[in-house]
Image (tube, grey):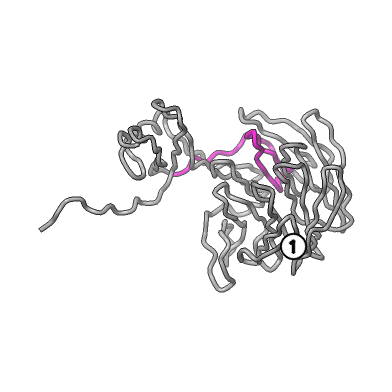
Amino acid sequence: MLCRLPPGTLMIIATLVISGGTLGEDLHQHKHLPITLRSRPVIERLPLRVVDPVDVTLTDFGDTLVADRVGRVLLRIDARGESSLIGRELDGLCRVVDSPQMGAHALLTSRGSGRIVRMTEAGVQHEVAQLPFLPAGLGASPFDGSLYTSNSRTGDVIKVEADGTLSTIVRVSDTTKDLVVNALGTTVSVLLNSGKIVSVGVDGSRETVGYVPATATRLVYHPDKFLVALCEDAVGKTVLLKPAASRLQQPPVFAGAPRGTKAIAFDTLGNLTLANPELRAITRVTSRFEQRCDDCGKMMMIKLSTEKPAPQESTRRSF
């Protein structure tokens, strides 16, 4: 379902509703607190024909990369909505990440082993590394071009240098499902089969940072620097959960998702993109916008929310 706002609606309402004050006060002080609009998010299906989209990620340039396992291809949708094929004949395709230095990388698996293939901007496709184990997860450092994966059976967290050299950082306490690298490239968060999440430093340090249900399959970072896991709840619904501090606590629900969703990704504002093989669709959920202030030129954050505003304390005296 596509939910669109009429042209100009955002700016009209933005002049009326501001979190923490009126628009006049905000412009005068130039604090630009986030503007909250009482509205449902904008949901749109991206114009891309896919058969079995098993992974999705967003690049620093705003492109969307989609891995289609049945098609054995890696697809790209740029910021203008134009699609292109950047990788083909990728047997066993299961993950895709983007390295700002080295380009898009795909993780392929087959009968207890794996491969990492690189696709450059020049259209060159070549193998980076052979993995003599069944890998789980793929992450990219934002700075030095290195990649990270894990041995799903032993729990070894593996660093893959830009030239394909493999080295083990540390072994975690259980078999693994997925991993993700933080924005600074300093830690790798690993999702274990038990639902425990372990943060591994590139220096080999490690600590438990939270727990999600054992049904969790994917782990991603939100741009506000917290982790989100893709899970099924007790009745089989697909949900996005924040990790709980202990096994005894219920993980907070971040959002719901259509049944059959297999992969998720966030853009720099926190908007969500979902890959769903059952629907054969890539869907984008937009709940945050930026608008430039005409007075000072700074960007203002505009959030769409269906939550009721917090009650305001009365400023009038009653008797």
Looking at the image, residue 309 sits to the left or right of residue 172; the answer is: left
Residue 192 placed where, x, y %? 70, 64
Residue under the point 84% across and 55% down: 167
Q: Which of these two is toward me, 165 or 277?
A: 165
Q: Is residue 70 left or right of residue 276?
A: right
- Mark 1 crowdedness (10 Å alpha carbons): few <14, some 14-19, many ≥20: many
Q: Position of residue 165 (x, y in %)?
A: 87, 48
| Residue drawn at the location 70% of the way across and 34% of the way down | 76
Q: Give the magenta-colored segment's residue range.
A: 40-67
Q: Is residue 56 magenta?
A: yes
Give the vertical position of 207 relative to 124 (above or below).
below
Residue 26 image-quadrant placement: top left
Quickly name the residue at label 1: 176
Quarter the C terminus occupies? bottom left
Q: Report the residue at 59% width, 57% height from top.
A: 238
Quadrant of the rendered structure where residue 106 is?
A: top right
Q: Pick out the residue farthest to the left.
A: 319
Pinpoint residue 34: horizontal percent, then vertical percent.
42, 42
Amino acid type at mark 1 = Thr
The answer to whether residue 202 is above or below residue 24 is: below
